[in-house]
């Protein structure tokens, strides 16, 4: 290898490469042939990342491919010449050339001698070879083939590639690319000439010419989330189209209308992608005031937003795969790819992006700054819930939108169901971000007398006032729905039917955990808990089995469809006759009345018989399909857990803590059902009051109580005691009011003292 022109660094590298070869191969003689081969191989890998040896199979495959193309285009003479010359070239002895330089010159092989005199020797294969007329610009006729001579590794090699690979259309004042002079390919020039002739005030402007392929590529890049473009630009967070971008075969207004339509979806993708980056923490751009990221700062996003972002991320992953497939087809050039064809192919995806952006704007972007997480989470879930019902009511026209929203909802609702599952299974309401509508009041311990009443707070959000209210769940949570209806409050919609059961089950399980009873240990043992399926998993399995139900039993489905159709036709005729009586003929109204009647009359019968098979056909689609899914796939699991928790609590209190005995004691002594026992006790006090003697001595009261109880119920004498409380003098209007300070106490084992 020649080292005369090498730099000091290259010479040092040469020595290191030799040492490497000596160390690995063990050959110390640098003049040996094997050492030189290893040295060349190593240098080749360092420079080109591979050994520069031609693959004979690839070469032969390329030669055969060109021969087949010539035969397809009926160029028999060229095909024969191609085969003969390539075989002659491949079978010729290899010349002794320097491996560092590549010379391209036509004098090595006289290809032109084998072709006709009027054909260009260096012209590449094109449509002209097939006999198809192709328009050529004068510039193409004037171009001369110049032998290219360049050296690998020279400084101007990169600039040569940049000038010959693609026209740098993204730079200003770029030369116009050569194109056909056909009328269809020059519609822009024809239109500009027409405007110039008809409008005396028309002034031509500088334009940036691009090809349709370049427009398609930038469209794909925009929809994939790329922020820097030439045709599309980001200004103040909005995607706009350049005014000077044109193509030769479309007018400026036509191209701009198409690009602005694309920019709307690009803006939606940009906003959704930015929200994903903000939640995941990958956003590097400054955020405008009032945005989600500026509000949160260093605070991590709560789990509901994380789940929503994960659902969006999964959708955009599949969407970008589709964009990559289109771009691969564009690069392959196996078939014609036009902008109209790409947009038609992306129409279903663009409609889905529109739905996602609408949900994002309503559920996330429009939420005021400094809003609590509980409001943000509930508002997002309600937005998805209402969107599913809204699109589902349309029918088959929005089937893809319903499927997309339902998959989005199932992912977003996962943190909520996990919080519910942790509460009703382990008795622990784990909600560090305070996004759940029920919050634990930490000031009230489990062993407090007001635990069942004041332990949890139910948050509801008012749509009209947009303020946060705290509603006590009122003992068992049964009045939460009534309070919400009176004040027009909304909460997480899908939990309304089972909110009472969730509160009751959560309280019962927490109380069981605190009592440390055997049932709780058996129910929540580590082994059984490892085998237990979470509420979210059970919900997904129920949904999957519900969706497979129609596939597994096609006979039953057809039977139900026929019965539903017959009932629908019958009711439609009845309602139609009724409407015609008032000179009102509206077939659509009659159909909707019939569906409404079937929905209301047959709902309980069909639902009580087991899982309801909901057909997506036009005969059975109703606006309550989503609610039926929740009723059959989610609510039964919560109801089952509610029955288990409350049943275990009552069994424990009855069995281990003698609840019934204590309640009977309360009735005996506090409600005076003990008969003569409490009669003897209070008679002694009333006698003192009548005689106007002092009776407020604790010793006297306890003696009278023990004598009265000890005679008939000696087992309760140690549990009962008397206390005296100070009474406000204002309340002592009558002598009988003095008894208000008398407090009877009954001690219960292992439970808080109950007093009255």
Image (cartoon, rainbow, N blue to C red):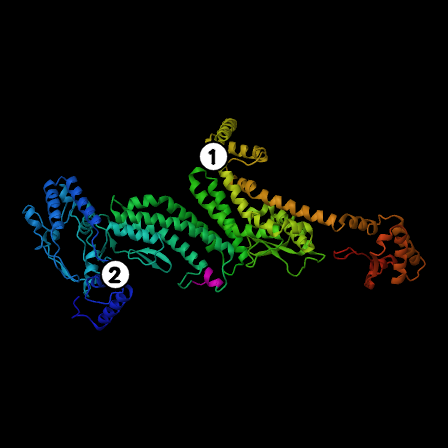
Residue 657 screen position, x and y as percent: 75, 51
- Would residue 323 be visible to someone looking at this image? yes
Residue 290 in magenta stretch: yes
Residue annotated with mark 2: 45
Q: Calculate the distance from the C-alpha at mark 1 to the C-alpha at mark 2.
A: 58 Å
Q: Tell me if residue 261 can be seen.
A: no
Q: Secondary structure at mark 1?
A: helix
Magenta residues span 288-296
Label 1 or label 2, whichever lies nearer to me, is 2
In front of the other: 716 or 52: 52
Quarter occupied by the C terminus: bottom right
Question: In the picture, which quadrant includes the N terminus?
Answer: bottom left
- Residue receiving disc 1: 551
> Which residue ends up furthest to the right in the rendered image?
691
Task: Say if 92 sits above or below 553 in the image.
Answer: below
Q: Please, is residue 402 above or below residue 574 in the view?
A: below
Q: Residues within 10 Å of mark 2 (few under 14, many from 20)?
A: few
Q: Quadrant of residue 456?
A: bottom right
* SS state under label 2: helix
Residue 311 horizontal/vertical position (percent)? 45, 50
Left or right of 747? Residue 602 is left
Residue 596 locus on image (x, y percent): 53, 34
Question: Where is residue 682 drawn, in percent x and y?
Answer: 89, 54
Q: Is residue 754 left or right of residue 389?
A: right
Which badge, 1 or 2, comes first in the chain's sequence?
2
> Is 517 in front, or is 231?
517
């Amino acid at each position: 290898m020649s080292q005369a022109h090498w730099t000091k660094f290259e010479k040092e590298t040469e020595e290191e490469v030799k040492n490497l070869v000596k160390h690995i191969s063990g050959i110390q003689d640098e003049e040996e042939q094997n050492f030189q081969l290893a040295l060349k191989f190593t240098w080749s890998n360092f420079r080109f990342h591979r050994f520069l040896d031609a693959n004979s199979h690839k070469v032969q495959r390329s030669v055969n491919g060109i021969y087949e193309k010539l035969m397809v285009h009926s160029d028999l003479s060229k095909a024969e010449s191609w085969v003969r010359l390539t075989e002659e070239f491949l079978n010729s002895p290899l010349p002794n050339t320097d491996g560092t330089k590549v010379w391209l010159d036509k004098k090595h092989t006289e290809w032109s001698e084998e072709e006709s005199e009027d054909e260009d020797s260096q012209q590449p294969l094109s449509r002209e070879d097939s006999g198809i007329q192709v328009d050529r610009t004068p510039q193409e006729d004037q171009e001369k083939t110049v032998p290219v001579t360049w050296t690998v590794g020279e400084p101007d090699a990169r600039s040569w590639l940049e000038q010959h690979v693609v026209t740098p259309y993204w730079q200003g004042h770029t030369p116009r690319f050569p194109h056909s002079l056909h009328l269809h390919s020059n519609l822009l020039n024809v239109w500009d000439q027409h405007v110039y002739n008809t409008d005396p005030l028309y002034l031509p402007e500088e334009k940036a010419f691009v090809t349709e392929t370049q427009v398609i590529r930038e469209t794909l890049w925009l929809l994939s989330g790329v922020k820097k473009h030439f045709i599309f630009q980001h200004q103040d967070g909005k995607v706009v189209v350049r005014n000077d971008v044109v193509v030769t075969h479309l007018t400026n207004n036509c191209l701009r209308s198409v690009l602005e339509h694309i920019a709307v979806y690009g803006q939606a993708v940009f906003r959704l992608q930015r929200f994903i980056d903000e939640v995941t923490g990958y956003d590097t751009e400054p955020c405008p005031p009032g945005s989600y990221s500026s509000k949160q700062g260093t605070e991590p996003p709560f789990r509901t937003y994380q789940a929503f972002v994960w659902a969006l991320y999964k959708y955009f992953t599949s969407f970008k795969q589709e964009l990559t497939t289109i771009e691969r087809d564009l690069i392959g050039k196996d078939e014609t790819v036009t902008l109209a064809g790409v947009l038609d192919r992306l129409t279903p995806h663009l409609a889905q992006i529109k739905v996602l952006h609408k949900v994002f704007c309503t559920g996330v972007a429009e939420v005021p700054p400094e809003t609590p997480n509980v409001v943000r989470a509930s508002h997002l879930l309600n937005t998805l819930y209402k969107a599913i019902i809204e699109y589902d009511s349309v029918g088959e026209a929005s089937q893809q939108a319903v499927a997309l929203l339902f998959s989005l909802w199932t992912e977003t609702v996962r943190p909520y169901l996990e919080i519910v599952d942790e509460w009703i299974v382990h008795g622990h309401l784990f909600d560090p971000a305070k996004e759940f509508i029920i919050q634990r009041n930490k000031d009230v311990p489990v062993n407090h007398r007001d635990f069942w009443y004041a332990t949890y707070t139910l948050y509801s959000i008012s749509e009209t006032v947009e303020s946060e209210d705290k509603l006590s769940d009122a003992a068992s949570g049964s009045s939460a729905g009534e309070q919400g209806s009176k004040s027009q409050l909304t909460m997480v919609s899908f939990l309304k039917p089972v909110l009472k059961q969730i509160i009751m089950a959560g309280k019962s399980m927490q109380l069981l955990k605190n009592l440390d009873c055997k049932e709780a240990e058996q129910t929540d043992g580590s082994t059984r808990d490892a085998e237990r399926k979470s509420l979210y998993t059970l919900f997904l399995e129920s949904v999957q089995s519900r969706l497979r139900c129609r596939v597994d039993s096609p006979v039953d489905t057809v039977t139900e469809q026929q019965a539903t159709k017959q009932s629908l036709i019958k009711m439609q005729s009845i309602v139609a006759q009724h409407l015609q009586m008032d000179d009102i003929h509206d077939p659509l109204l009659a159909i909707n009345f019939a569906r409404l009647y079937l929905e209301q009359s047959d709902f309980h019968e069909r639902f009580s018989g087991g899982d309801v098979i909901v057909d997506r056909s036009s005969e059975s689609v109703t606006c309550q399909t989503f609610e039926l899914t929740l009723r059959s796939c989610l609510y039964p699991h919560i109801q089952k857990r509610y029955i288990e928790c409350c049943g275990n609590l009552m069994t424990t209190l009855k069995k281990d803590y003698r609840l019934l005995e204590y309640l009977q004691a309360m009735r005996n002594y506090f409600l005076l059902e003990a008969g003569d026992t409490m009669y003897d006790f209070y008679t002694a006090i009333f006698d003192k009051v009548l005689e106007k003697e002092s009776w407020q001595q604790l010793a006297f009261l306890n003696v009278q109580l023990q004598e009265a109880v000890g005679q008939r119920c000696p087992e309760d004498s140690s549990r009962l005691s008397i206390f005296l409380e100070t009474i406000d003098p204002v309340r002592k209007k009558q002598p009988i009011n003095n008894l208000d300070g008398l407090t009877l106490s009954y001690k219960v084992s292992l439970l808080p003292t109950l007093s009255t």
